[in-house]
Image (cartoon, coloured by chain):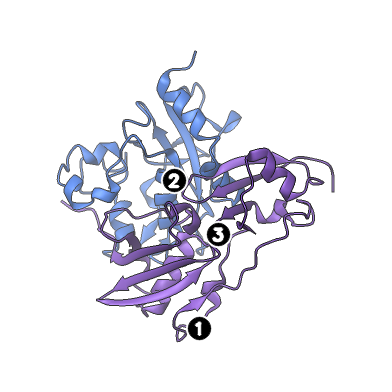
Chain colours: A purple, B blue
Amino acid sequence: MENVAIEHFHHRQGGKPTVVSAAPADTLREVLIRLGPLEEGIFVFVGECDYALKESADVEDGADEHEPVDIDLTLEVLEIVRHRHVHVHKCRHIGVEVNFNGKPKRHKFSPNATVGVATDWARKKFRVDPALAAEYVLQLCHSTVQPRSDEHLGDLVKGEACSLGFDLVKEVTPKG
Amino acid sequence: MLPPDQRLFEADLQFAEYRNGVAKGLWGQVVGDALPEGTVWPSVYFWMAAAPRTGAPDRYYVALNLSGYRSVPPTGPFWDPVTKQRLDFAKWPKGKKDSRFATVFRTEGFSAQGKAFYHPYDRAPVSDHPQWKTEQPHLVWTSSHTIVDYLEEFQSLLMSGDYLGI
């Protein structure tokens, strides 16, 4: 691989992602240290996890099997140019509960799963009619906030929390 | 020196959320010779990727007026990169009957038809629909919203199952 800087997106708990450039031969540890202190007990993931979409609709309380990476490997070995996203997180999983028609469904998502993946998972788990599914979206409980589908679950949790609660709601169609 | 709204817009194009969409091929800005002659701020052109449909393009273009960005919502219609004019209604993306898609991209029945999208993220219909602020509070455009919110909202519709083609 040419020694061209790799542009990727760096995520931390509860914050907006940032754009980072680093050399392919840099280890991920070196890149992370340049960005700030590296805390003990953190998990680092690369890419975006869509494991939940492969799970059968009959599985209850499932969990993503997406392993943290060894940060002493280089960006080239970790294929950051392909994965593009690096997540540094205190949570191994984000426990997500989605409510629909008074019933909850739960799944432990990797922090690098997107809201879009969680939405598709919820539509499947609640067996929403595929013809209508596009109009159902996730809304954070006790709020009117509907995060964008490209946002990552790990970016949405606040403070020490490792969980999120959503309602699956029908998107309002403009009228009047 | 660039005006404040243009400076804010240019800064937002450097954010990870926007760059991530570009890297994924979801959207991009039209630049250079592809622009209509004499294009100046606040006119900005983007393309948004669409799900494959027989006989339909793989992307749609929008011509936006971003005056007052981010305090003021964007506004603008679909745009034709060949003629460099507003896209003919016959070529606007069509959605399932009575779907949210069909409503948002309607080409009749509101004051800004053909010039804007029927959605709270577009400043033109918002002025005629003050009730949207209470009916759809999550879609009220605020100064915290960015061009990514706009692009993601409409690009998601173009990827949805309600999109039929042209």
Q: Which residue is mark 3?
A: A112
Closer to the observer: label 2 or label 1? 1
Which residue is located at x 53 percent, y 39 percent? B82
Q: Chain of mark 1?
A: A
Check disc 1 and report its element: helix, strand or loop. Answer: loop
Q: Name the spot of residue B3 as percent of width and height, x first.
A: 43, 17
Question: Which amino acid lies under the numbered mark 2 shown in the image of this protein?
Answer: Leu
Q: Seen in the image, is A85 located left or right of residue A135?
A: right
Bin the neighbour count of mark 2 within 10 Å (Cα to Cα): few under 14, some 14-19, many 20 and up. Answer: many
Which residue is located at x 48 percent, y 17 percent? B2
Q: Chain of mark 2?
A: B
Number of on-image labels: 3
Check disc 2 and report its element: helix, strand or loop. Answer: helix
The front one of A111 and B136 is A111
Q: Name the spot of residue A9 as percent of width and height, x first.
A: 60, 46
Question: Which amino acid lies under the numbered mark 3 shown in the image of this protein?
Answer: Asn
Measure the C-alpha gap from mark 1 to mark 3.
20 Å
Q: Which mark is residue B151?
A: 2
Q: Seen in the image, is B88 located left or right of residue B33?
A: left
Q: Which residue is mark 1?
A: A56
